[in-house]
């Protein structure tokens, strides 16, 4: 509440910006605590049947302003102990990390147990731009994989550091990648040691790579080593015990990655992002797109059933039976549920559907 009160002073800045540039449509302020301030104000649309999934901290304009471009490697433990709920929580952690990335970032995901393997085989020994297509590949492959063997942290960490290390990495020598911050995210249910020798070899004393560790499960005894790894390498440690807390715990890494920007003090650089539209981000809400597509298919199926009934009782239900011989009329009926629609009628129906979609989007975004 205190943050909401002090951020109220931004209204004067918003009004001043609008006076200087009347073409501004919307102005936003997103807080690291999760609330959003919007100018001009508008009633927040909600859908009582579905949860409100909007989080400004996952929007491109927030993420790109909050931290610098980064090269990131995610190490996902797939050893035999990562079963059941642990496995599901770990996958959700990785998904939420991926959703915080944008096209300025470069990433790869490796699974490790006895051996270390790229999650997407064709992405081995490289980092790929965190665009929608590549992130979609990671998300699809996360559905596969079964826990097995014992986790070999030495191989996994070595693989990550060698890929990131500038003096050995063909990737960085080529001038590709973000050429800025670097991070390793370890998602596991525990580590047998702190692997200090690996950090001495690859990361000390320069500390070019930040370590972020996510402990999955209820075991408090396994905190020590993972907490040490993060603290000794300018990172952050979190303990994730339930699915409900995954997003909040994952987002804690963003302020840590943003720490170098604090050195600018009052001279913060401007960040330019792509055009932002107030619609749902497909990276965050793939399931929402599927839900809408299912609704569209359901509506089309219902219209087809109506069409079947009309065909079985033409005289009573249809004024002009010849409409059934016209492919365009049949297609319009399947899409909109009516015959003999003019172009103006179709435009009106589409506009109504668009308004319904925007209301639904705002309630989920």
Image: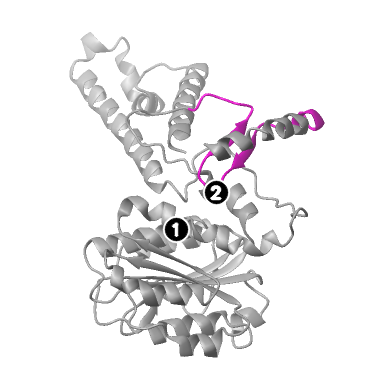
Where residue 365 is drawn, which disc sits there?
none
Is 173 rendered above or below residue 75? below
Q: Residue 199: x, y in percent? A: 51, 85
Q: Looking at this view, is 103 or 309 the one in front?
A: 103
Q: Residue at x 47, y 90 (%)?
A: 197
Q: Secondary structure at mark 2?
A: loop
Where residue 250 is drawn, which disc sits there?
1
Q: Residue at x 74, y 57 (%)?
A: 265
Is 107 rendered above or below residue 232? above
- Judge whether residue 110 can be spotted in this image: no
Q: Residue 294: x, y in percent? A: 32, 38
Chain-order first, disc 1 or disc 2:
2
Q: Which residues are magenta?
A: 18-44
Q: Residue 150: x, y in percent? A: 27, 82
Badge 1 local density, few (<14 within 10 Å), some, or many (20+)? many
Rounded to the nearest angstrom, the CA distance separating label 1 from label 2 is 12 Å
């Amino acid at each position: 509440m205190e943050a909401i009160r002090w951020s109220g002073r931004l209204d004067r800045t918003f009004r001043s910006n609008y006076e200087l540039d009347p073409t501004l449509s919307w102005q936003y302020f997103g807080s690291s605590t999760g609330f959003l301030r919007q100018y001009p104000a508008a009633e927040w649309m909600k859908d009582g049947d579905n949860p409100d999934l909007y989080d400004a901290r996952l929007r491109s304009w927030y993420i790109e302003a909050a931290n610098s471009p980064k090269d990131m490697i995610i190490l996902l433990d797939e050893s035999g102990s990562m079963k059941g709920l642990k496995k599901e929580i770990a996958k959700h952690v990785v998904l939420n990390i991926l959703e915080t990335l944008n096209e300025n970032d470069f990433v790869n995901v490796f699974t490790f147990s006895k051996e270390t393997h790229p999650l997407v085989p064709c992405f081995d020994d490289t980092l790929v731009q965190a665009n929608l297509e590549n992130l979609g590949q990671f998300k699809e492959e996360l559905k596969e994989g079964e826990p097995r063997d014992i986790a070999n942290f030495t191989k996994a960490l070595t693989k990550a550091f060698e890929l990131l290390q500038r003096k050995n990495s063909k990737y960085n020598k080529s001038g590709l990648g973000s050429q800025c911050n670097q991070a390793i995210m370890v998602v596991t249910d525990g580590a047998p040691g702190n692997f200090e020798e690996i950090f001495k070899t690859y990361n000390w004393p320069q500390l070019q790579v930040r370590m972020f560790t996510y402990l999955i499960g209820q075991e408090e005894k396994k905190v020590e080593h993972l907490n040490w790894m993060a603290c000794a390498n300018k990172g952050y440690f979190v303990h994730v015990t339930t699915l409900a807390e995954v997003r909040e715990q994952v987002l804690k890494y963003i302020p840590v990655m943003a720490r170098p920007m604090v050195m600018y003090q009052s001279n913060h650089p401007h960040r330019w992002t792509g055009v932002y539209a107030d619609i749902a981000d497909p990276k965050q809400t793939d399931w929402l797109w599927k839900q809408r597509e299912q609704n569209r298919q359901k509506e089309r199926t219902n219209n087809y059933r109506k069409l079947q009934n009309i065909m079985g009782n033409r005289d009573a239900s249809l004024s002009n039976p010849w409409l059934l011989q016209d492919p365009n009329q049949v297609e319009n009926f399947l899409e909109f549920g009516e015959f003999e629609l003019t172009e103006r009628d179709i435009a009106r129906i589409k506009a109504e559907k668009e308004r319904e979609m925007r209301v639904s989007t705002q309630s989920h975004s």
